[in-house]
């Protein structure tokens, strides 16, 4: 087995620390902690270098908060200086370990991820029969239950540099979980030390290293062909349900005795492929796939909530209206609001809605979920129809058109030829097309764009100025507005 030694000096070298600093600040350059570190960047990096060189480095405390997704998770975020150290180690250890991971481990690795993991599972499902069986398992409280003594032992098999082991030990020992029911006692040590922080970059790598023994046990000892793992979730496909039950007993015993983890029977599913294999956000069937219903409902709920906040005018007044139209994002400055109670803390701009729509559309493209995509598209187009009326100026083209007409060098007249009219006309045509194709949601939202609908929309507040709406429609939404505006004059 290949081992690695004498690379500690490369980890703590200033060029590597500076590269780690650049990676650590991505997406959070405006945070106070990062700005304070940058005020004395060179001296801070030098102090960190000498602390690592003298082995006087000690991790700072963690900031703990909770995130509720499918379930409530405790996140422990390290200080920014510690994040730099984590990146510095990760730059080397990732390259050393990645080639020893099995091909079908898809979490936190380059050129892997959820979509490729599900694609691999779909290839296994299509090679099997609908009457074949699958077993899906989930390790109970995985990150909170990793045995720190065992993790250090596994890492020391391949890394022989004592200084690197000291630094890795410092990071592992910086956090310890309270005893929970999912913990399995390590009888080799009197002091039980469990858990690694979810917020650490190194925890992603350590989690793969820890379960690499399980992967080799499944592939080499059990000789299982169809096996895919993503973090602590894994799926096995076999022809016989009894064989899967035997695999469950042997894997459960291996995890308990060798890795001190618990595989609970209540979290294990054994069923036919024809019922669908639910894995990492998708459900795989023999001839098609779809997104998980729970995830779809959650997205629609949050998307509608953001639309509601957007229409209520919760937009940062400093934001450039031109960037609102074109969908340019400033996620680092203005956080997306997903719940109404967060309204005082942030703003919803149109770019956030656009980015959410594009992101989930790309997610849907990895499955056969065209019906769900059309439903989301209707919701998104309803925002555009209302937006065109709101930002298109005064419909009657009277004196109220004022700033909008003046900015575009188009003085108010008695004829409906200004940009506001043409924008609304383009959307009216699109709404008519949608109604003819059976998209009743658009019909209900904007049955027509005249009369009392415009009277209602004209009372809503709008920004002072807009960008060329035609370019926005063509480039960002791919709406066929050129045909509608071809003979506009």
Image (cartoon, grey):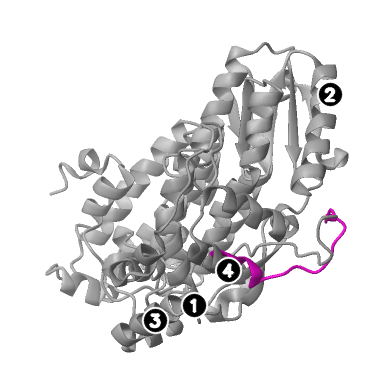
Label at residue 246: 2
Q: CA distance from mark 3 to mark 4?
A: 17 Å
Observer-nearest of 77 and 202: 202
Q: CA distance from mark 2 to mark 4?
A: 38 Å
The tag earlier along the polypeptide, 3 or 4, is 3
Between disc 2 and disc 1, the foreground one is 1
- Residue occupying the point 19% across, 57% down: 417
On screen, residue 30 versus residue 415, left or right, reads right
The 10 Å Cα crowd at callout 3, few under 14, some 14 to 19, many 20 or more, is some
Count of numbered circles on the image: 4
Observer-nearest of 259 and 389: 259
Residue under circle 1? 55
The 10 Å Cα crowd at callout 1, few under 14, some 14 to 19, many 20 or more, is few
Is residue 337 within the magenta segment? no
Is residue 179 within the magenta segment? yes
Residue 316 can be seen, yes or no: no
Q: What residue range appears in magenta? A: 168-185
Residue under circle 4? 171
Q: Position of residue 286 (x, y in %)?
A: 63, 17
The tag earlier along the polypeptide, 3 or 2, is 3
Q: CA distance from mark 3 to mark 2?
A: 54 Å
Label at residue 50: 3
């Amino acid at each position: 087995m290949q081992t690695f030694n004498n690379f500690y000096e490369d980890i703590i070298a200033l060029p590597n620390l500076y590269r780690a600093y650049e990676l650590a600040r991505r997406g959070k350059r405006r945070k106070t902690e990062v700005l304070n570190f940058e005020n004395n960047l060179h001296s801070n990096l030098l102090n960190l270098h000498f602390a690592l060189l003298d082995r006087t480095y000690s991790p700072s405390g963690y900031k703990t908060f909770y995130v509720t997704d499918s379930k409530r998770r405790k996140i422990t975020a390290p200080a920014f200086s510690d994040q730099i150290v984590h990146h510095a180690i990760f730059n080397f250890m990732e390259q050393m370990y990645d080639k020893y991971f099995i091909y079908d481990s898809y979490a936190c690795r380059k050129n892997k991820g959820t979509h490729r993991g599900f694609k691999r599972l779909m290839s296994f499902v299509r090679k099997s029969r609908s009457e074949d069986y699958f077993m899906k398992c989930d390790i109970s409280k995985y990150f909170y239950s990793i045995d720190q003594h065992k993790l250090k032992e596994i890492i020391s098999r391949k890394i022989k540099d004592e200084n690197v082991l000291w630094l890795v030990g410092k990071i592992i020992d910086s956090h310890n979980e309270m005893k929970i029911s999912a913990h399995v006692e390590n009888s080799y040590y009197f002091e039980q030390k469990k858990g690694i922080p979810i917020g650490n970059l190194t925890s992603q790598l350590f989690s793969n290293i820890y379960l690499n023994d399980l992967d080799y046990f499944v592939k080499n000892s059990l000789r299982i062909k169809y096996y895919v793992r993503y973090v602590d979730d894994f799926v096995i496909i076999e022809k016989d349900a009894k064989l899967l039950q035997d695999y469950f007993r042997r894997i459960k015993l291996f995890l308990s005795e060798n890795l001190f983890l618990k595989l609970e029977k209540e979290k294990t599913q054994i069923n036919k492929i024809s019922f669908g294999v639910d894995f990492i956000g998708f459900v795989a069937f023999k001839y098609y796939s779809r997104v998980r219903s729970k995830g779809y409902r959650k997205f629609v709920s949050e998307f509608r909530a953001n639309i509601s906040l957007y229409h209520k005018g919760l937009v940062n007044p400093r934001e450039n209206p031109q960037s609102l139209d074109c969908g340019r994002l400033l996620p680092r400055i203005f956080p997306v609001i997903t719940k109404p109670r967060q309204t005082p803390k942030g703003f919803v701009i149109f770019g956030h809605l656009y980015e959410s729509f594009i992101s989930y559309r790309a997610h849907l493209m990895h499955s056969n979920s065209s019906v769900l995509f059309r439903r989301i598209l209707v919701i998104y187009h309803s925002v555009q129809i209302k937006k065109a009326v709101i930002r298109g100026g005064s419909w009657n083209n009277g004196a109220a058109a004022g700033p909008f007409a003046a900015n575009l060098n188009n003085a108010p007249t008695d004829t409906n030829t200004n940009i506001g009219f043409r924008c609304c006309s383009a959307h009216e045509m699109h709404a008519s097309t949608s109604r003819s194709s059976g998209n009743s949601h658009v019909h209900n939202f904007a049955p027509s764009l005249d009369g009392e609908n415009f009277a209602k929309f004209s009372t809503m507040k709008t920004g002072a100025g807009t960008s060329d709406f035609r370019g926005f429609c063509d480039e960002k939404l791919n709406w066929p507005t050129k045909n509608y505006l071809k003979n506009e004059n």
